[in-house]
Amino acid sequence: MDFFGPREVLIAVVALVLVAMVLDGIRRVKRNRYEKLQMSSRKLQKAAGDYWDEPETPPNAQFPSGGSRVVGIRDDADIQEVEESLRRSSGGIDFKFSRQPQQEQFDLDNSIFDRERAQLNEQNAREAEEQAEAETASSSEEKDGLHQDVLVMHLMANKGDRIQGQELLDAVLASGFLFGGRKFFDRHINDDGSGEVLFSLANLLNPGTFDLKTIAEMDTPGITLFMALDELTDPVAAFDTMVQAVDQLVAKLHLNVMDESRSSMTKQTIDHYRQRASSASVRREQGSE
């Protein structure tokens, strides 16, 4: 009887190969572990040698990154040698080295605070002076009548339209206005241009003035009528005359009447304007007593 046929031989060979592979893997693992232990030992020895060879960094270094690092200077002779070498290479500049870092001294007197207080006092004095000047100017303006009650009416063309200069000139002159020295059209108490100015007519566009030489070629979206109530002898009568002039201009130029806020003029606004004119008359009478 044959116990070792081809099949049994093949199985035995495969088994031996597997055993050999396992033994070789175990050997490689042991060798790698041994090499790692040797490398770790060498690194520790080298680090220990570097630690004892390199000097310790001063604990109170004055640089943010750990700064001052000693480079092998051991005694006064080495320090003097380094100073002399740096002096020669730097054109005679005197370098001084010290074993202990020197603490910088700061000027802690009150000179900085004194300057700040002086600047603050100067600024306060300047602000007080400016405020006094502003109050004086405001009082002067009130005395000069610059803060008076002024009635304003705007006459605006329809949206997208413009008032032609020649048509405007013809309508303004027909309504009793005369061209004045301020380059506005003024309506006087008398038709011949004598007497006080009741109200004036200005261009809606800045600066509000007109030029008679070029008025025929210009155009504008609107005009403004204004009346200084406190300067008039009879503000109520002047306001009625202003309303009549507005009616004439609107009829000739087909304009829209608006109040001082450029809102559509209403009957209530007209009554309010007339009441303001009446109040100005009362103030004038009280001031003349």
Image: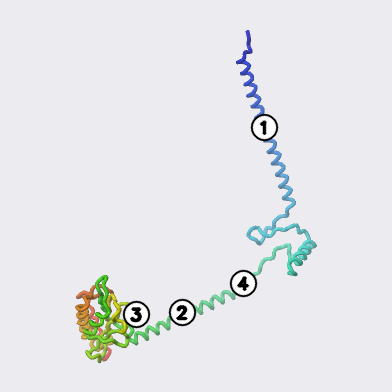
Label 1 and label 3: CA atoms lie apart by 101 Å
3 and 4 marks in contact (CB < 8 Å) = no
Label 3 and label 4: CA atoms lie apart by 60 Å
1 and 3 marks in contact (CB < 8 Å) = no
Q: Amino acid at mark 1?
A: Arg
Q: Quadrant of residue 89?
A: bottom right
- Residue found at x 34% / y 87%: 144
Q: Earlier in the sequence, mark 1 or mark 4?
A: 1
Q: Position of residue 58 (x, y in %)?
A: 69, 58
Q: Amino acid at mark 4?
A: Leu
Closer to the observer: label 2 or label 1? 1
Label 2 and label 1: CA atoms lie apart by 90 Å
Is residue 60 among the parts visible in the rendering?
no
Label 1 and label 4: CA atoms lie apart by 73 Å
Q: Earlier in the sequence, mark 3 or mark 4?
A: 4
Circle 4 — which element?
loop
Q: Amino acid at mark 3?
A: Pro
Provide the residue designation for mark 3: 207
Q: Amino acid at mark 2?
A: Glu
Residue lying at the far top in this picture: please name it. 1
Provide the residue designation for mark 4: 108
Q: Nearer the viewer, residue 283 or 148?
A: 148
Circle 1 — which element?
helix
Q: Position of residue 175 (x, y in %)?
A: 21, 84
Provide the residue designation for mark 1: 28
Q: Earlier in the sequence, mark 2 or mark 1?
A: 1
Q: Nearer the viewer, residue 124 or 248?
A: 248
Closer to the observer: label 4 or label 2? 2
10 Å neighbourhood of mark 3: few (<14), some, or many (≥20)? few
Q: Earlier in the sequence, mark 1 or mark 3?
A: 1
Q: Is residue 268 above or below residue 231?
A: above
